Amino acid sequence: MIAVPAHRPAPSADAPHGAIRARYRRVRAETEALAAALSPEDQTIQSMDDASPTKWHRAHTSWFFETFLLVPHLEGYTTFDPAFRMVFNSYYEQVGPYHPRPQRGVLSRPGAAEVGAYRAHVDAGMERLLDVCDDRVAELVLIGTHHEQQHQELILTDIKHALSLSPLCPVYAAAAPEVAAAPLAPPGWWALEGGIHRVGFAPSGAPLEFAFDNEGPAHDALIRPCAIADRPVSNGEFRAFIDDGGYRRSELWLSEGWHLAREQGWEAPGYWRKGEDGEWRVYTLHGERTVRDDEPVCHVSYFEAAAYAQWAGKRLPTEFEWEVCARRFGAAEADDEVQRPHPRPLKPGIRQEVWEWTQSAYAPYPGFRAAEGALGEYNGKFMVNQQVLRGRSCATPFGHARPTYRNFFPASARWQFAGFRLAEDR
Amino acid sequence: MIAVPAHRPAPSADAPHGAIRARYRRVRAETEALAAALSPEDQTIQSMDDASPTKWHRAHTSWFFETFLLVPHLEGYTTFDPAFRMVFNSYYEQVGPYHPRPQRGVLSRPGAAEVGAYRAHVDAGMERLLDVCDDRVAELVLIGTHHEQQHQELILTDIKHALSLSPLCPVYAAAAPEVAAAPLAPPGWWALEGGIHRVGFAPSGAPLEFAFDNEGPAHDALIRPCAIADRPVSNGEFRAFIDDGGYRRSELWLSEGWHLAREQGWEAPGYWRKGEDGEWRVYTLHGERTVRDDEPVCHVSYFEAAAYAQWAGKRLPTEFEWEVCARRFGAAEADDEVQRPHPRPLKPGIRQEVWEWTQSAYAPYPGFRAAEGALGEYNGKFMVNQQVLRGRSCATPFGHARPTYRNFFPASARWQFAGFRLAEDR
Amino acid sequence: MIAVPAHRPAPSADAPHGAIRARYRRVRAETEALAAALSPEDQTIQSMDDASPTKWHRAHTSWFFETFLLVPHLEGYTTFDPAFRMVFNSYYEQVGPYHPRPQRGVLSRPGAAEVGAYRAHVDAGMERLLDVCDDRVAELVLIGTHHEQQHQELILTDIKHALSLSPLCPVYAAAAPEVAAAPLAPPGWWALEGGIHRVGFAPSGAPLEFAFDNEGPAHDALIRPCAIADRPVSNGEFRAFIDDGGYRRSELWLSEGWHLAREQGWEAPGYWRKGEDGEWRVYTLHGERTVRDDEPVCHVSYFEAAAYAQWAGKRLPTEFEWEVCARRFGAAEADDEVQRPHPRPLKPGIRQEVWEWTQSAYAPYPGFRAAEGALGEYNGKFMVNQQVLRGRSCATPFGHARPTYRNFFPASARWQFAGFRLAEDR
Amino acid sequence: MIAVPAHRPAPSADAPHGAIRARYRRVRAETEALAAALSPEDQTIQSMDDASPTKWHRAHTSWFFETFLLVPHLEGYTTFDPAFRMVFNSYYEQVGPYHPRPQRGVLSRPGAAEVGAYRAHVDAGMERLLDVCDDRVAELVLIGTHHEQQHQELILTDIKHALSLSPLCPVYAAAAPEVAAAPLAPPGWWALEGGIHRVGFAPSGAPLEFAFDNEGPAHDALIRPCAIADRPVSNGEFRAFIDDGGYRRSELWLSEGWHLAREQGWEAPGYWRKGEDGEWRVYTLHGERTVRDDEPVCHVSYFEAAAYAQWAGKRLPTEFEWEVCARRFGAAEADDEVQRPHPRPLKPGIRQEVWEWTQSAYAPYPGFRAAEGALGEYNGKFMVNQQVLRGRSCATPFGHARPTYRNFFPASARWQFAGFRLAEDR
């Protein structure tokens, strides 16, 4: 068990780049807090090609700062270990060769403690850098903190997948006391009138304001008259789909999804298992428990979301319909930056606890150009064969999501905290 | 060698459903003419999971008429062989189980001649059906002829792939005399002003008018000011990309394409091979010959098209930009219905001889609903993880393509006659 | 349908190499007779990596004569097509590169008729060669005829596998009238005393005498006192194993076999299928019929044979125990050379109709040295990870098998006509 | 880093089952000493399906004692964790289901420390059991100690493979000072006369005497006159094979080996790598160093051993030739039981430091019957598609090997410490 690192005090108000520095400290400490529940062995394992070990996430996020900030911008900086340049590069071709992703689980070294030392080394360098760097470089630091927050969510999704494969049914963290499930009223519908709407990220100049490159440029979108559900589909609603033979009715499914579902034996969302009493049980980071009907359905692929929508006689929203609703009806206001426990405590009937599949394929916005250099590989090179997800999940750190945020995964992905809401034409 | 079936005379003007009947006869004869160049052995082989044997195409297109027209709508019709219902079903889940696609090449029976007898049996039934059926049923016959034309193109793409794998370098058909290559001027640019444009298929009521369900409903699209090249990228232009290291520069590529290209050793478009003299040679249905600089580049994946556009500092057009240009500038006027030889004779500098990758993912148009029943599986269930191609190719039958036509293939596909043209923001 | 070639008359008694020439003519004609029942399409298909198309077998056996006899030994011989040197090489590395085995099914050309022309071309050359060649070369011709007989059996095993995959349940040849099954008495036991026995092939100098290199040198083997069953295990006996849960009792199985059986869902011998009435049915070259209890069990892997023996409290014989019995008790006298129909008519209770798995791994005999040059690759390079089978099957040509014959296949192989008999220590 | 457990004192001479108890204590302590050099992270990783994590080996060997000794034979014993019955079962079908081998690397829990507690719990039980059990049960304890010694060697082979995949080139243990390489004289030859020799294990009744079931029954073997090299082939000798194109000459190889070698790009023994200066370097448990010509070649597959022998004009010995030599010439006298460091210090020119491939396939001896119950699965069910290795390696614990010992691995295995010696017919 790793000792939880003491939270470094907030920098004084007049320190250089004080707000970014404070955010840097906070995010870095949050990563370590997430890992603190995991033993060195837990932090080492990799359960599938798409997932990574916890200590790899801890090291890679530090590599990001070392590679894009410290090495090019901090005079006199000494790398912690030159071999890490290759070992903890995720996929930046322009940085050089990298250790193959499916083999991250074979790296026992550096161990969890040494990764901690690497993080401390990078943190020390970053403090020095922030003392001296200009605003343009500080902007890159801000990117790095948001990058690290993405990996915070992956730490949880990836360890959940790995632990779920053990017959010992291990627990990541003790559960909060359960609140009794309350009957869930049918969703309400938010109406959107047709016409031109403005979408995408447009900077306002507020401090710490941030968006990834793929959220812009802001531009006009033509939206058809429609209505969007005011909450995601719930477990209870999804069980009606299962009980109606939803997983065995080919006419509801996209062809690729149908074949995948049969090949992999899908009969329910990911992590669901039918108990001996016929009740659905679900594996969570708090261990296995009964499926709650009032929670949003989670760990479904795009294929399952689309099949459900077909079954319900509705459709999934486009990413722009979603975004306009989010701004107008407050479905996904930007989080404040206050640190709160991970994963978020579940509130019954909560409107927003899962990433939501949209029917939009992940594509560049009009006028999008990737950044020059290796950082340009961040988002742009994945713009094919992925679907956009909007919102945020119970595993998303506070201060990370916003209405223009575009998450993306292949339609087959189930290990993310992903659900969906319905839409209909009007 | 199969005898080319005599072309049945055009029906008299006052025969019931005369125009559809004439089209039916013509299309069916064209299919047999395409297959006539192939021996029974040629018609049997399957070279990859995505491709099908020629005689399977010949039988499946007949199965389509038998299953959707003759069995439900022609009283007293006797099926040719009840087992064919399963054997020649391609993917219609609602019709019942089907022989797995990757195993079509193991079906030596029925042989090519028996497939010919099956076709004649179906043709006889169809003539009787057209004598008695109503307009709604005749409309389904029209669908069937367009379905068969799609398979005519696949007969050529699939046999080209299969024959290309033989070390004997076999020839499908003798080549027409070559015209000398002429220097190709740089493309001109068609300008599109921004704003709302109408796209998609809207019926005019003309006789024999046709579109697939995925081409509608017609709707408004918001287009940004841009310009579109007036011809596809040529082999000569693509060679400059190759010579500039295009296949070895990761920064130009989508991530998935980069990994696929390296895994499969792509260094040039499909069917290209560097001769011992260093010249690029290309395998065609007429045998191997030297690559002509004045022809459109062909047999490239979406990944190669996108990488080239990145290299050229341009982008691919969206499918709507393409469609508006096609209507306005005549890039892809609807063909007449006159039968001409297959594949089309190549005209130097021709504007339109390849399907063209667009940057648009294949998705339903607003308001799209698939048809009821098995025919609803035709297009809708493939609307994920595919890119739209527009135009037509040298292998597309006359009378088949039109400006609203949406072809679609996975981004990795190379065995289709696919190229691309460039676009740029204005 | 290919016309059955007229059987060339036997050469006159005083023709050079008259006996070998007669054998050559007979064997070549038998190959064509086997293929005559198959359409060009049938002859083209390949159903798995281990199997080959019929016309490939017809061509490869001709390639053998062309490559090892005509090209090196017949002055003035012109090859039929130089490309065939590569296309029809099976695995002789020293001859040069070869077309990959799993891709033999994509070779539509040369077609079945052209392969016939190739065979005629080679036959004409071989007649000329036999007019002039010396005895050493004639010896190679004899090897070629035995090589071709091996492929005659493979023509049947491979087309059986391919046709069995068709939902149309095609028939290779009409069945002879069935004789009623008679109750089968338990097997008798042949006793072998312990001690040194002579095994392996020792030439006697008889005309046309032949053995493959792997059957020698003759040598002493030490045999333990034991008894060998006087007939193979029957279908009826094997059904008792199935009914006793033999396919679900891990303790009876070799570990590798157990996992393979579960992975592939084995529940009975190859080609068996439980009918809707609960009766076992079996696919044969004559179509599907009911399993006969009085026939030897066939199409079992070594793993199934070994599991049955374990279940029965016995063991499989070693190849030397088998050979000594064969010589002493006549289990497998050498065939005469008279041509008879293929496959052999099934006689109820017949002692020998299946290849028989032995417990001996395929290994070189003491003092074995492979021949120099490419022909040395024939047998020796396969001496690992294979089990020896002895005897002959209903698909083995007459005049091919003998008591010292060593057939060999991987323990997992099921598409051969393979069964087994039991042994026990005494 | 795990604390090395204190070596428990030897039991007093008159304790019940004193000798076995002493051996139990020693072997258990040796396992922990081997693991002590490895961090919890190191002990968790699994680099391929055939290898297992260190802590899995530590737990599985304890499971063996718990399952086969404590649960059935110690009244009042409480299992440490009932779930371990499944988690740490390796392959004993009769014990029940087991966690799939390729997924052992995903088990982060129990952690290395908890496995230590499991071991202590089992040890305490075993001491109590030895106080009260009869001789038959004590015999099973002896089996368990030899079983654990097999896993001691696997701990080293498996961690070597895993660490070798890291670009950081990690070290298991510091190397002893190197002794300078001395020129190696050609091997001498031990002559064996032909005739009947006795082989296999025959009990003498000596205390602690032990052999696995697959080493018996003792029986007569017929041996041909031959000679066996008095030492294994050296690195220097093997380099001559490499330099002579041995990895590129198909005629030297078994067919399966040839294809595997090309598929996997073998150009030298496992763990060899050509440095930038053209010198061969080798990864060892002490880190990478230059290949020493005077050491036995190691980490070669059976295929490489057989190809070398073919190249050298010799052959590999049979397992019986090897065994007779071992007894007569002292090539592999039984070790004493004294504990010495792991891995064994390398002595220049040492005769015996690698397991040696023989040409014998792994098969049951005449009269072999596996034990009743789950322990019968230990050896017998693997008797197909494996080759016998004889001798012992630098990773084999003292007191484990003997002249009749039969190690076995698939012909393709390279991660074991395996070399070979030559033989020739006389």
Image (tube, coloured by chain):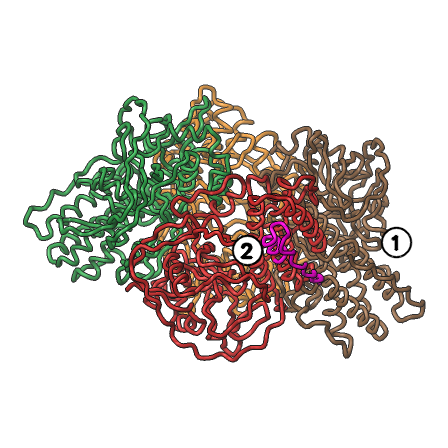
Chain colours: A orange, B brown, C red, D green
Residue B352, compared with residue B94, is above or below; it is above
Q: Is residue A415 left or right of residue D195?
A: right
x 33%, y 32%: residue: D296
Q: Mark 2 or 1, which is nearer the eye?
A: 2
Q: Residue under circle 2? A: C150
Q: Quick one: which residue is furthest to the right in this view?
A: B13
Which numbered dot is residue B336? 1
Q: Label 1, secondary structure: give it.
A: loop
Q: Is residue C97 left or right of residue D172?
A: right
> Which chain is indicated by disc 2?
C
The quarter holding residue D395 reads top left
Front position in the image: B370 or B77: B77
Please state the horizontal and vertical placement of residue A182, each as a whole percent of the image: 46, 65
* Residues shaded magenta: C1-26
- How many dots with numbers? 2
| Tag 2 near tag 1, CB within 8 Å | no
Q: Within 10 Å of the Cα at label 1, are there few (<14), some (14-19), or many (20+) other Cα atoms?
A: few
The quarter holding residue B228 reads top right
Front position in the image: D413 or B21: D413
Q: Quadrant of the C terminus of chain B?
A: top right
Q: Quick one: which residue is furthest to the left in this view?
A: D14
Residue D310, compared with residue B6, is above or below; it is above
- Residue type at mark 2 is Gln
Please state the horizontal and vertical placement of residue D83, each as a whole percent of the image: 30, 58
Q: Within 10 Å of the Cα at label 2, are there few (<14), some (14-19), or many (20+) other Cα atoms?
A: some
Prevailing secondary structure class for the magenta stretch in the rendered image: loop
Front position in the image: D81 or D188: D188
x 45%, y 54%: residue: C406
Q: Is residue A118 left or right of residue A183?
A: left
* Residue D207 part of the magenta-drawn span: no
